[in-house]
Amino acid sequence: MIEVHELTKRYGGKTAVDRLSFTVRPGQVTGFLGPNGAGKSTTLRMILGLEAPAGGAATVSGVPFRSHSRGLRHVGALLDAGQVHGGRTATAHLSALARSNGISPRRVEKVLHEVGLADAGRRRIGGFSLGMKQRLGVATALLGDPPVLMFDEPVNGMDPEGVLWMRRLFRRLAAEGRTVFLSSHLMSEMENTADQLVVIGRGKLIAAESVREFAARSTSLGVVVGTRQAAELTAVLTAAGASVEPEGSAGAEKLVVTGLPTDRIAALAFEHRILLTELTARAPSLEEAFMELTADSIEYQAGQTR
Ligand SMILES: Nc1ncnc2c1ncn2[C@@H]1O[C@H](COP(=O)(O)OP(=O)(O)OP(=O)(O)O)[C@@H](O)[C@H]1O
């Protein structure tokens, strides 16, 4: 469990994280979402005690991270995969961490195998691709078999096969009862992976809820109705209070109806003996819901000066 309470961080006059509070529970994958510069990395660094907050506090399994001796056995984190000593081999890197955290050296082979780097253990990290460095970062996070895992933009630089592998890994780690917290600026990365979402913008909490609740928040984009009796149906639906627009060109056989639910549209069509060829509620994608919700908190937008 990760608990963040009123966490605040300022850089000069700028508040990067603003009285942020949320809880990340075990047994689930929780996505940490926000546009670029929202304060995700800063929050993760404060949870890990790598930066001191200006206010508030964060605990991991009930205590501040710094109070955990042999930290890797309590929290595994992948923050910046590029930040490893390039001259060392993967095995040497992991072995040194295992020693200083009181972890059995046998874990090194095991985690290298787990992340698909079993054959690369003797190679120098400096020659690794970005995707391999991400895998090594995951191996480091898993080394101490910790109950809490945090990953900052983990799929950056991974190929599609690697992304799929990571998704499965996150799901499995959560199914094992661990707390799994992943940051991303892309909703599409969370859509098939996360159970819960913590969404922030400009350092402030925007939403903390399940993916399903998040999707339900966004306003419906209307119902697409197909019929060969478009004029007749338009008159009936308009009389019932809906607004009706032809989809695409005027005179089309598809209409976009807002202001009435699908079952009411179907009932009215049935009553007036109008045959429908399609009846589809247009739900916005999670990506659209995310963009709608964070639109006011984007720092840098193309074509706009602030
Ligand atoms: N060391 C620093 N000194 C000054 N400002 C900083 C520092 N680190 C972060 N910031 C600022 O704090 C804000 C939050 O940055 P942070 O990296 O936490 O955002 P993020 O959500 O992780 O973004 P991204 O998705 O781009 O990584 C940004 O405006 C950033 O410019």
Image (cartoon, rainbow, N blue to C red):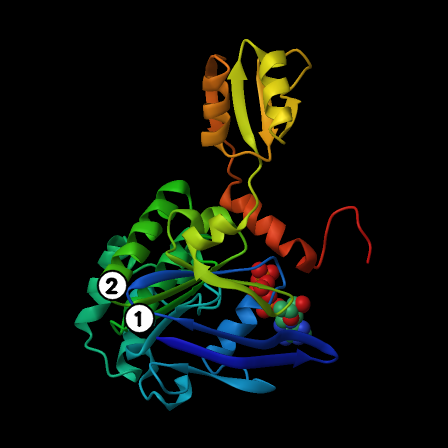
Residue placed most toward the observer, 194 or 170:
194
Tag 1 residue? 94
- Left or right relative to 179: residue 264: right
- Decide: marks 1, 2 in contact (CB < 8 A)? yes
Between disc 1 and disc 2, whose residue precedes? 1
User: In the image, is residue 250 above or below residue 70?
Assistant: above
Q: Can residue 129 be seen in this view?
A: no
Q: 212 left or right of 148?
A: right
Q: Where is residue 18 in the image (x, y as percent from the top left)?
A: 62, 76
Please name the amino acid that badge 2 sits on.
Val
Instruction: Tell me what residue is drawn at x 63 percent, y 63 percent.
Output: 37
Query: In what quadrant of the picture does the C terminus appear?
Result: bottom right
- Local crowd size for mark 1, using a 10 Å CA cut-off: few (<14), some (14–19), many (≥20): many
Query: Residue 195, how many percent across, how many down?
Result: 37, 56
Q: In this view, does 7 lie above or below 150?
A: below
Which secondary structure lies at badge 1? helix
Which residue is label 2 attached to? 111
